[in-house]
């Protein structure tokens, strides 16, 4: 389990808890994980795009 954006991994023994925090996506049929930090960053950039489109 590795973040597809920054390459970080959950701490040893915390994968079970990380699965709840990490975002799971699918890219070309393979599961892709995104760590909470990166998903937050993406969320902001998605919101930014929506904003600029909207206004
Ligand atoms: Zn990350």
Image (spheres, rainbow, N blue to C red):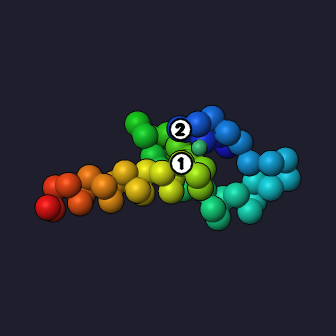
**Where is residue 10 drawn, in percent x and y?**
74, 48
Q: Is mark 2 within 8 Å of ligand 1?
A: yes
**Image quadrant where one finds the C terminus:** bottom left
Q: Is residue 55 visible?
A: yes
Residue at x-position 42% and y-position 57%: 43
Would you identify the image quadrant in which residue 44 lies?
A: bottom left
Report the residue marked by disc 2: 5
Neighbour tally class for label 1: few under 14, some 14-19, many 20 plus, Cα within 10 Å: some
For label 1, the residue is 38
Confirm or deny contact between disc 2 and disc 1 (CB under 8 A).
Answer: yes
Seen at 67% across and 39% down, the residue is: 8
Of the two numbered discs 2 and 1 on the same chain, state the one appearing first in sequence. Answer: 2
**Residue 26: where, in percent of width, then height?**
45, 46
Q: CA distance from mark 2 to mark 1?
A: 7 Å
Q: Secondary structure at mark 1?
A: helix
Sort mark 2 into few (<14), some (14-19) or many (20+) by Cα contacts within 10 Å: few
Badge 1 residue CB within 8 Å of ligand 1: yes
User: Quadrant for ligand 1?
Assistant: top right
Q: Of 37 and 9, which appears nearest the observer?
A: 37
The picture places residue 48, in percent across and down from the top left corner, at 31, 55
Q: Which one is nearer the viewer's eye here, 11 or 24?
A: 11
* Secondary structure found at label 2: loop
Q: Report the residue at 54% width, 48% height from top.
A: 38
Q: Would you identify the image quadrant in which residue 21 lies?
A: bottom right
Instruction: Judge whether 28 appears above or below 17 on screen.
Output: above
């Amino acid at each position: 389990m590795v973040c597809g954006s920054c390459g970080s991994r959950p701490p040893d023994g915390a994968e079970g808890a990380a699965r709840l925090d990490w975002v799971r996506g699918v890219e070309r049929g393979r599961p892709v994980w995104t760590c909470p930090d990166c998903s937050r960053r993406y969320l902001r950039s998605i919101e930014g795009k929506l904003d600029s489109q909207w206004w």
